[in-house]
Amino acid sequence: MTFLPNRSVPLPEGTEAEYARWLGAIDEELSDPDCDRYDLCRRILTEIYFPQWIGVDPSELTGAARIALLQMDARHVTREPEYYAETDAEKYERVKPLLWLWERFDSSPLGENVHLGVLFRRILARHVFRRCGRNFKAFHQVKLSFGYNMEVGDDVVIHREVLLDDRGGIVIGDRASISDFANIYSHSHDVVDGRDVLTPQTVIGNDVRVTYHATVMSGVHLAENSMIGSFGMVTRDTEPNAVYVGIPAKKVREKPVREKHGPTQDPLAVE
């Protein structure tokens, strides 16, 4: 194999500074304990999607245009966790507008801009998660359930189209990596009555790799430095330093013991 660390990608002169000003203003506003998160969400999304309607009273519009503008304000939206009996209404109220902002940003023309998107989601994650370590990196279209039940360590990478169902809580350790289209669950339903729900915490240990399209079921503990192969479905705890594949995932070998390459610069690490 060829050693291929990520490289830095230069932006046109002035672009990075423009991004930094916009992101810095958002972070500063969110850091104010008196910040109206719903108003912040509404203003940002209106600027992105409907700048021509900034300051317009929705009652002055007609039909679908009025409804579309209302969607910029998360107060006019209901989301699935709000219907769950165990949801902490106060905690969810604080994160709801930021989760809505996260998802609508990702669906906008800005969402697939890697540089801007990673930094934008990093700011939101720090204000949504129970704990968010340094240099968190999420690519576009990551889906969160509650958000406030997430605990994330340092240098964690979540790739595109990942589902993080943190209904019962998800803990992700340092340097863990979750690849594209993976699903991580922390709740399950009784086979007889789906209203009987279990919500055990799911733990992904330090240096774990969950690869493409893999699924981790609720309550599973992925031990340190274990790896889940593509399309694997993990239903039981793993052992450290082991590789698991299949449905259900089974241990197929120990990870080889050999010296790794030295540290390389992450071009999007800014902390």
Image: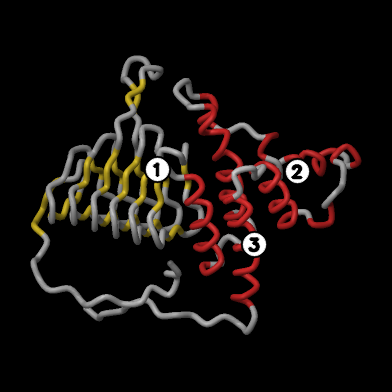
**Residue 150: assigned label:** 1
**Residue 68: assigned label:** 2
Q: Residue at x 56, y 37 (%)?
A: 94
Mark 2 / mark 3, whichever is N-terminal:
2
Snapshot quadrant of residue 109? bottom right
Mark 1 / mark 3, whichever is N-terminal:
3
Q: Residue at x 32, y 58 (%)?
A: 177
Q: Specify the amino acid type for callout 3.
A: Pro
State the count of labels.
3
Measured Cα–Cα span from mark 1 to mark 3:
27 Å
Q: Is residue 210 rendered to the left or right of residue 81?
A: left
Q: Nearer the viewer, residue 50 or 231?
A: 50
**Residue 159: assigned label:** none
Local secondary structure at mark 2: helix
Quarter of the figure with the C terminus = bottom left
Measured Cα–Cα span from mark 2 to mark 1:
30 Å
Measured Cα–Cα span from mark 2 to mark 3:
17 Å
Q: Nearer the viewer, residue 57 or 143?
A: 57
Q: Residue at x 38, y 55 (%)?
A: 133
Query: Quick check: marks 2 and 1 in contact, CB under 8 Å?
Result: no
Q: Position of residue 140 (x, y in %)?
A: 50, 57
Q: Position of residue 178 (x, y in %)?
A: 34, 55
Which residue position is annotated with label 3? 109
Question: How many neighbours does mark 3 have within 10 angstroms: few (below 14), some (14-19), or many (20 or more)?
Answer: few
Q: Nearer the viewer, residue 25 or 188?
A: 25
Q: Specify the amino acid type for callout 2.
A: Ala
Query: Quick check: marks 1 and 3 in contact, CB under 8 Å?
Result: no
Local secondary structure at mark 1: strand
Q: Position of residue 143 (x, y in %)?
A: 48, 46
Give the foreground label among 1 and 3. 1
